[in-house]
Image (cartoon, grey):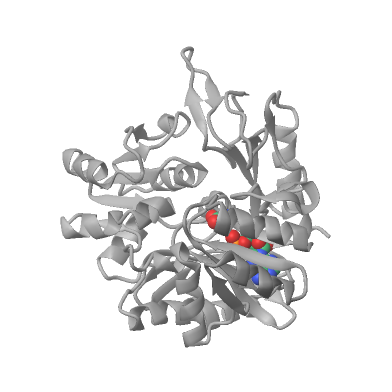
C-alpha cells in the first residue's frame, strides 16, 4: 500500500514511524510533514486543511490509504470529500468530528445517552455567562466552544481570572466567534483512552496520560501537551473496563443512533473522580503527545489494521504491555502564548528502544533543524518501568545544548508518587 499521512506534528511522525514497520506499506507520504518527518517519509508541502490539494495529491501518487492526524483537516471535511471521490481514508466525517469540534454537541450527546461527564451550561452572551459564573463556587471551568488546539480551556481560581477569560472568549473573540461552556469543576487523575472505532466497533489502545500544563508541577498555562507516558498505575483493569463499557462503547453507539457513525480514532479524555470515571473531553483523532507513547507499544501491523477496519473487518491490535513508554516534549520558549521561533535544534542520538518524533521543525540553508513553532519535538523511550523510562529520557535530554527551548523535568511524576 501507498499511504498518505495528513498533518505535520509529533503525532503524525509517530504514525509514520508505526506505518514504516508495516510490511504491507511500501511507501509513505506525509502532507505537509516537517523537516524531521522528511527523514522517514516523503513530505509534500500541501496544507492539512487544503482538502482539494490533498485530493489531487492522493490521486497523483495513487495513494491506497490516507490517515488523518489533525482535527482541522477533519473539520475542513477531508473525509467527506475523499469518500465522495471513492478514496480510502481513515478518520471521521465532518459531522462525526463534531464530537471534538463542538463542545455543545459532545455535551448534549453525553447528556442524552447517559454518558458520565461534568454538568454544564453554554453561553454566547458575556453578561449572562459572567452572572452565572459569579453565582457559583470557584474554580470556574470555562471552555471556548470550538477548536482552540487545547488552549481554549481556562480553570479560573479567582473571579478576576474568570472575567478576563470570558472577555477574551466572548467579547474579544480571541479564538473566533464561538460560545462558552461553563462546567462543574471535577477532581481526580486524568487519562487518555484512545480507541480505533468504526460504527459500533470499538478497539481499544493502551492508556496514556498527558501533561497539559506548560511547567513542572502542573504550573503555567494549558498547552497542547508537554509529555506523556503509559501505562498508568492508578487506573485499574476494572476502571479500564468501566471506561470502555460505560463511555467509549456507548459513545460509539450513540453516534450511530444519531446518524453520524464515527470511524477513526475516538479519544476519550477521562477523569477518575471520587464519583466515578467521567468525560472531560472527546477528540476525534489521535492525541498528541499520547500517540507518541502509545504507538511504539503496538506489536501488530498498523497499516494492515486500519486497512482491515476500512474493509469492514475486526482486526486484532496487539500491544507490548511488558514495558513502559515515556515521552518528553521540547518546546520553543514562550509556548503556548508567545512562541519565539528560530531556535537551533540539536541532533539527538537515541538507541533502538527510543525515538525522536519531530513537530515544529524546519530546515535551514545548511540542512540544520530549526524550531518553527511551539512544540518542536518529543523524545520517547521504553524501559521495564516508568521510573527507568523517565531516567532514560532525561539522560538523553539533559545533556543537550538547548537555547531558546524548554521542557518539563517531571513527566510521569503522577505515576511515581
Ligand atoms: P480539555 O481541553 O477540555 O481537556 O481541558 C484541558 C484541561 O483542563 C483538562 O485536561 C483538565 O486538566 C482541565 N479540565 C477541563 N475540564 C475540567 C473540569 N470540568 N474540571 C476540572 N478540570 C478540568
Ligand atoms: N493531548 C491532548 C490532545 O491531543 O488533545
Q: Nearer the viewer, residue 95 or 286?
A: 95
The extreme right residue here reads 417
13 relative to 122 in the view: left or right: left
Q: Nearer the viewer, residue 322 or 51?
A: 51
Q: Position of residue 171 (x, y in %)?
A: 57, 56
Residue 142 appears in the rendering: yes
In this rendering, the answer to whether 372 lies above or below 208 is above
Q: Position of residue 7 (x, y in %)?
A: 40, 44
Q: Position of residue 122 (x, y in %)?
A: 55, 73
The extreme front residue here reads 127
102 relative to 232 in the view: left or right: left
Q: Position of residue 290 (x, y in %)?
A: 57, 54
Which image quadrant for residue 258?
bottom left
Question: In terms of image quarters, where does ligand 1 lie?
Answer: bottom right
- Residue ID at (32%, 39%): 29
Q: Nearer the viewer, residue 118 or 204?
A: 118
Residue 322 appears in the rendering: no
Count the numbered circles shown. 0
Q: Quadrant of the C terminus?
A: bottom right
- Residue ID at (57%, 69%): 181
Amino acid at each position: 500500500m501507498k499511504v498518505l499521512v495528513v498533518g505535520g506534528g509529533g503525532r503524525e511522525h509517530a504514525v509514520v514511524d508505526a506505518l514504516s514497520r508495516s510490511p504491507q506499506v511500501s511507501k509513505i507520504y506525509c502532507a505537509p510533514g516537517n523537516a524531521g518527518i522528511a527523514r522517514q517519509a516523503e513530505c509534500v508541502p500541501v496544507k492539512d486543511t487544503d482538502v482539494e490539494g490533498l485530493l489531487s495529491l492522493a490521486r497523483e501518487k495513487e495513494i491506497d490509504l490516507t490517515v488523518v492526524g489533525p482535527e482541522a483537516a477533519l473539520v475542513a471535511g477531508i473525509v467527506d470529500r475523499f469518500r465522495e471521490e471513492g478514496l480510502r481514508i481513515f478518520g471521521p466525517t465532518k459531522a462525526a468530528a463534531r464530537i471534538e469540534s463542538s463542545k455543545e454537541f459532545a455535551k448534549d450527546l453525553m447528556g442524552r445517552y447517559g454518558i458520565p461527564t461534568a454538568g454544564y451550561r453554554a453561553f454566547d452572551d458575556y453578561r449572562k455567562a459572567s452572572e452565572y459564573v459569579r453565582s457559583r463556587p470557584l474554580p470556574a471551568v470555562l471552555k471556548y466552544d470550538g477548536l482552540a488546539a487545547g488552549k481554549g480551556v481556562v480553570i479560573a481560581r479567582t473571579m478576576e481570572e474568570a472575567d478576563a477569560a470570558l472577555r477574551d472568549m466572548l467579547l474579544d473573540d480571541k479564538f473566533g466567534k464561538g460560545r462558552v461552556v461553563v462546567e462543574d469543576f471535577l477532581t481526580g487523575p486524568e487519562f487518555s483512552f484512545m480507541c480505533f472505532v468504526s460504527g459500533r466497533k470499538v478497539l481499544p489502545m493502551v492508556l496514556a496520560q498527558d501533561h497539559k500544563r506548560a511547567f513542572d508541577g502542573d504550573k503555567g498555562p494549558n498547552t497542547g501537551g508537554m509529555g506523556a507516558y503509559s501505562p498508568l498505575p492508578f487506573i485499574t483493569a476494572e476502571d479500564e473496563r468501566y471506561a470502555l463499557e460505560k463511555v467509549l462503547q456507548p459513545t460509539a453507539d450513540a453516534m450511530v443512533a444519531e446518524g453520524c457513525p464515527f470511524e477513526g480514532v475516538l479519544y476519550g479524555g477521562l477523569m477518575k473522580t471520587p464519583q466515578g470515571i467521567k468525560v472531560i473531553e472527546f477528540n476525534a483523532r489521535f492525541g498528541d503527545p499520547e500517540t507518541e507513547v502509545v504507538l511504539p507499544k503496538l506489536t501488530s501491523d498498523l497499516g494492515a489494521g486500519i486497512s482491515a477496519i476500512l474493509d469492514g473487518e475486526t482486526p486484532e491490535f496487539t500491544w507490548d504491555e511488558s514495558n513502559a513508554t515515556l515521552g518528553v516534549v521540547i518546546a520553543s520558549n514562550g509556548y503556548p502564548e508567545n512562541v519565539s521561533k528560530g531556535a537551533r535544534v540539536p541532533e539527538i542520538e537515541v538507541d533502538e528502544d527510543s525515538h525522536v518524533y519531530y513537530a515544529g521543525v524546519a530546515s535551514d540553508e545548511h540542512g540544520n533543524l530549526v524550531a518553527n513553532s511551539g512544540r518542536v519535538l518529543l523524545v520517547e523511550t521504553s524501559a521495564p518501568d516508568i521510573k527507568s523510562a523517565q531516567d532514560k529520557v532525561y539522560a538523553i535530554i539533559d545533556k543537550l545544548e538547548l537555547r531558546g527551548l524548554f521542557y518539563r523535568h517531571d513527566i510521569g511524576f503522577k505515576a511515581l508518587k
